């Protein structure tokens, strides 16, 4: 695992360490820079009005504080009304992820019942079957010893298949959704890349067109899926769910869950192959998949960072935060806070083993915006990892995997393996 503090990151000022996270090298290995920031304190000023938080307690408190708000449409308007010309940003700001109370609860309550732990547990056998079909397909692709990309051919396919089934998208359209969701997701990752934003807008237009047709079809032929449900809610009461919010909700379910879960599975395989004893345990002891997955989430969280703005002054574990302050919450650093996790850079699934509940990592956030799909993502990883390793005991990396060159949502872009 990454050295806690590389010589380059050692002793650098906060602003320099933070700036490094915006470089290709910093994105390739952000952990030493997190430690460089942490060396100045768990919540430190980047400049007046801008706080960077690496502490576990501080991030947890910030995520739960009612006075800290996500960037919503009104906040974007205050920055520049030009954002409204971007279809992808409009859709995101019409979703729960980019809404504050009271809209946030209204939007979340429309779909939250479908993601409760018992509802998700009930999907276990369906997800198991989907996983088996994908493993069968993978076996065919790699039958003659050719390298296959584990991310494109397996890790990204399972989450898309699952959420497509829940939403009600056709099976034949899943590759289209994966590509569209990938393009759209970058519009929120703060990279500010205009070409990527243009691609995201194009993909959003395509998705909106598809969704308009699908909702019309479900009005004629209802089914037991989320599109039918959301269309009904919208038709009955537009105040509860407007047209843009309907699209925004479906879009956020598709985009929030697929790359993140794909990265969780990808990191899980990478970690298991790096330590054969862990791979062997995953094959032989299905109960081990849960603590293993939790430790993967802690050490390599797919979402590294989120942000909030203070609508009122607050005390953040001893740091005075004035109204208007923007907070960058580095979840990936909070997960390695030595005040919370002993020997935090060591990969140790035993932290979450039986009888040791352990302190949960902040990989799914906390508070009002706590990830709606957390039980689903955990279940998918718990099903996928042992089955993949058991089915292909000879699974080997062909070369080092390639990380996606992004900071906010970080994970493996490609991972060529032989089976
Ligand atoms: C390993 C996989 C996943 C990770 C690491 C992850 C991470 C997160 C995080 C950190 C947040 C909170 C963001 C914030 O507070 O600013 C979040 C919110 C959310 N996630 Fe996930 N997520 C994952 C999988 C999923 C899945 C599978 C779904 C749904 C199918 C999903 C749907 C959502 C939604 C709808 C929200 C917004 C909740 C709200 O604003 O109330 N996520 N996720």
Image: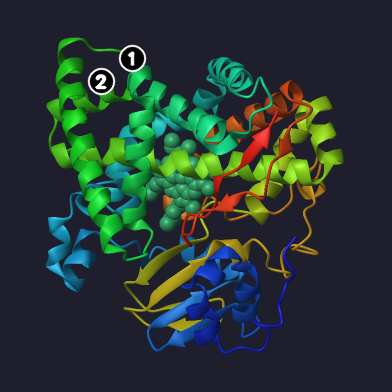
Image-based side of 180 in relation to 44, left or right: left
* Mark 1 secondary-structure assignment: loop
Residue drawn at point x = 75 percent, y = 63 percent: 344
- The residue sitting at 66% across, 89% down in the picture is 11
Above or below, comparing residue 170 to residue 233 in the picture: above
Q: In which quarter of the image is the C terminus?
A: top right
373 displayed left or right of 325? right
- Circle 1 residues within 10 Å: few <14, some 14–19, many ≥20: few
- Tell me: residue 137, above or below residue 47: above
> Dot 2: what SS?
helix
Frontmost residue, 300 versus 8: 8
* Residue 297 located left or right of residue 122: right
Q: Residue 370: in sight, yes or no?
A: no
**In the depicted structure, whether residue 186 falls above or below residue 117:** below
Q: Is the C-beta separation of discs 1 and 2 under 8 Å? A: yes
Identify the image's colour scheme: rainbow, by chain, secondary structure or one colour.
rainbow
Which residue, given by chain and number where applicable, does mark 2 sit on?
Answer: 228
Residue lying furthest top in this view? 221
Query: Residue 12: horizontal and vertical position, in percent?
Result: 61, 88
Q: Mark 1 points at which residue?
A: 224
Please say if 386 is above or below 70. above
Residue nearest the viewer, comparing 41 with 279: 279
For the N terminus, give its image quadrant: bottom right
Question: Residue 283 at x, y = what percent?
Answer: 79, 27
């Amino acid at each position: 695992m990454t050295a806690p503090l590389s010589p380059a990151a050692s002793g650098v000022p906060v602003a320099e360490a933070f700036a490094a996270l915006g470089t290709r090298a910093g994105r390739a290995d952000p952990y030493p820079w997190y430690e460089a920031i942490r060396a100045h304190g768990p919540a430190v000023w980047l400049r007046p009005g801008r706080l960077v938080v690496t502490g576990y307690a501080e991030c947890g408190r910030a995520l739960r504080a009612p006075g800290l708000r996500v960037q919503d449409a009104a906040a974007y308007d205050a920055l520049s009304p030009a954002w409204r010309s971007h279809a992808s940003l409009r859709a995101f700001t019409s979703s729960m992820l980019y809404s504050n109370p009271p809209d946030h609860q209204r939007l979340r309550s429309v779909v939250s019942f479908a993601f409760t732990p018992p509802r998700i547990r009930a999907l276990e056998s369906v997800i198991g079957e989907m996983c088996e079909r994908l493993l069968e397909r993978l076996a065919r692709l790699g039958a003659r010893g050719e390298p296959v990309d584990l991310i494109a051919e397996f890790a990204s396919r399972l989450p898309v298949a699952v959420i497509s089934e829940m939403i009600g998208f056709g099976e034949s359209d899943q590759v289209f959704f994966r590509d569209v969701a990938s393009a759209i997701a970058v519009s929120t990752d703060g990279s500010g890349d205009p070409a990527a934003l243009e691609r995201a807008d194009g993909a959003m237009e395509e998705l909106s067109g598809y969704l308009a047709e699908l909702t019309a079809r479900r009005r004629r032929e209802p089914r037991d899926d989320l599109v039918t449900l959301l269309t009904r809610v919208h038709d009955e009461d537009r105040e509860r769910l407007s047209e843009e919010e309907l699209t925004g909700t479906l879009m956020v379910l598709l985009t929030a869950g697929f790359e993140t879960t794909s990265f969780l599975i990808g990191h899980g395989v990478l970690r298991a192959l790096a330590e054969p004893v862990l791979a062997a345990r995953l094959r032989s002891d299905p109960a081990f998949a849960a603590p293993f997955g939790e430790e993967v989430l802690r050490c390599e969280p797919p979402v590294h960072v989120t942000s909030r703005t203070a609508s009122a002054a607050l005390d953040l574990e001893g740091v005075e935060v004035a109204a208007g302050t923007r907070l960058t919450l580095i979840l990936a650093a909070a997960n390695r806070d030595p005040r919370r996790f002993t020997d935090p850079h060591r990969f140790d699934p035993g932290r979450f083993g039986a009888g040791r509940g352990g302190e949960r990592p902040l990989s799914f956030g906390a508070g009002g915006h706590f990830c709606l799909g957390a039980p689903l993502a955990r279940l998918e990883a718990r099903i996928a990892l042992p089955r993949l390793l058991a089915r292909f005991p000879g699974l080997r990396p062909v070369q080092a995997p390639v990380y996606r060159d992004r900071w906010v949502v970080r994970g493996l872009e490609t991972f060529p393996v032989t089976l």
